[in-house]
Image (cartoon, helix red, strand yellow):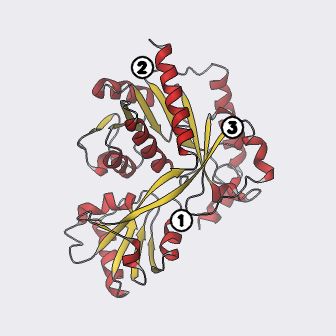
Amino acid sequence: MLDLLRLILSPLTVVYAFIIRARNYLFDSGIFRISKVNAFVISVGNLTVGGSGKTPAVIMIAELLKRNNKKSGILSRGYGRNSFGYLFVSDGNRIITTVDECGDEMYLVSSEARVPTAVSERRVVGAKRLINDSGVDAIILDDAFQHRWIFRNLDIVMIDQRFLLKSGRIEQRMLPLGLMREPFESLKRADIVIINRKFSEKEEIPVKLIDYFQSKIIFYGYYEVMGIFDVKTHHEFSLDEFRGQKSLVVCGIARPHSFLSVLENNKIDIKNKMLFPDHKNYTLKEIQEIRKKFYDTNANSVLTTQKDAVKLFKFSKDLDDIDIYYLKIRLVLENQEKFEEQLINKLNTNNKKNT
């Protein structure tokens, strides 16, 4: 059905591409004004719709800055939330909103990174208020490559390696036919490109696309499994404890391939699956469906992603008779030390200029 809808809307691809290029021209020529804020701004974004690993990258960068004693915060649009405008999510010690109010990704980021966080559709306004509310002097913008109204000191673009390897295929066309929010030529704005191979082996950039990456600083990233955790108690288990187990897999993420692959590669039976759209807002209806499927399939447990877990936790009482766990991962970069050195040097150089 989705593929059919894309084909129906495919004539709009030309219109969308024209609008994107015209918009970028207006920013590049200075007709659209880019505003600066009183902080070092790092943007983490992508060229495609979902699934590139921005959230693990934001957490990784926040932890990196914390290790180097930098006072940083995170600002996101808060996709999928039921609130509007600016919302201060966490002061770095406690989360002061609900997952519904701030969105699943920001709730997850806030719980993992433990730095001040906020959501705001208007990034300039949000950044200024986050600085005022928390006193941070560095801000990580989540999913902001296309949000050009705010000046950034460092632009990082995440690219899913599996997507990159689909050179010449329909997925690499612009929306609504393909999955690209911007063309590859927009990489000229990026300072750093992280190619996320997730759980796959490293592959070379396709020859057809290599010119777009020639002058870029490129890092390869991959996912490392931290363990499997109980959604209700957060007690940790190893993957080995689930080998051979018949599980009901539940997830609502953009590209579940990597999640499913790591379970399957670890000999976990995943034949029974309930795959929902990205940022799925679970209700009692879905919880009852999960319960029914769990008992109908005679599953030993329910396995989900960490992003889904933050939304399913509020249904702990409704799932009290079901063992439900989430897979926790983190993003690791090849040449992590080099990435950290470049980031901290750029931040320190910027601070010296401003003093």
User: Quick check: marks 2 and 3 in contact, CB under 8 Å?
Assistant: no
Residue 1 drawn above or below residue 42 = below
Please state which of the two labelled residues, at mark 1 or mark 3, is closer to the viewer. Answer: 3
Please rate how many residues cluster around mark 1, counting C-alpha atoms within 10 Å: few if below 14, some from 14 to 19, many from 20.
some
Q: How many marks?
A: 3
Indicate the secondary structure of the residue bearing disc 2: loop
Residue 109, disc? none
Circle 3: residue type: Lys
161 up-or-down from 81: above or below = below
- Dot 1 or dot 3: first in sequence order is 3
Q: Position of residue 74 (x, y in %)?
A: 39, 37
Residue positioned 51% across, 76% down in the render: 264
Residue 42: image x %, image y %? 49, 33
Mark 2 or 3, closer to the camera: 3
Q: Is 230 left, or right, of 138 in this rendering?
A: left
Q: Amino acid at mark 1?
A: Ser
- Residue 239 percent location from the top left of the image: 40, 72
Q: In the rendered structure, are the residues bearing label 1 and label 2 in contact, judged by CB atoms less than 8 Å apart?
A: no
Q: Position of residue 94 (x, y in %)?
A: 23, 43
Residue occupying image coordinates x 53% and y 34%: 341
Mark 2 crowd level (few <14, some 14–19, many ≥20, 10 Å Cα): some
Residue at image x 30%, y 51%?
Answer: 99
User: What's the mark number on residue 258?
Assistant: 1
User: In what quadrant of the picture does the N terminus appear?
Assistant: bottom right
136 w.r.t. 354: above or below = below
For the residues marked 1 and 3, what is the alpha-carbon distance in whole angstroms? 26 Å
Which of pointers 1 and 2 lies earlier in the amino acid sequence?
2
* Residue type (three-letter) at the residue carrying disc 2: Asn
- The numbered mark at residue 38 is 2
What residue lies at 44% left-to-right and 26% top-to-bottom?
124
SS under mark 3: loop
Q: Quadrant of residue 191?
A: top right
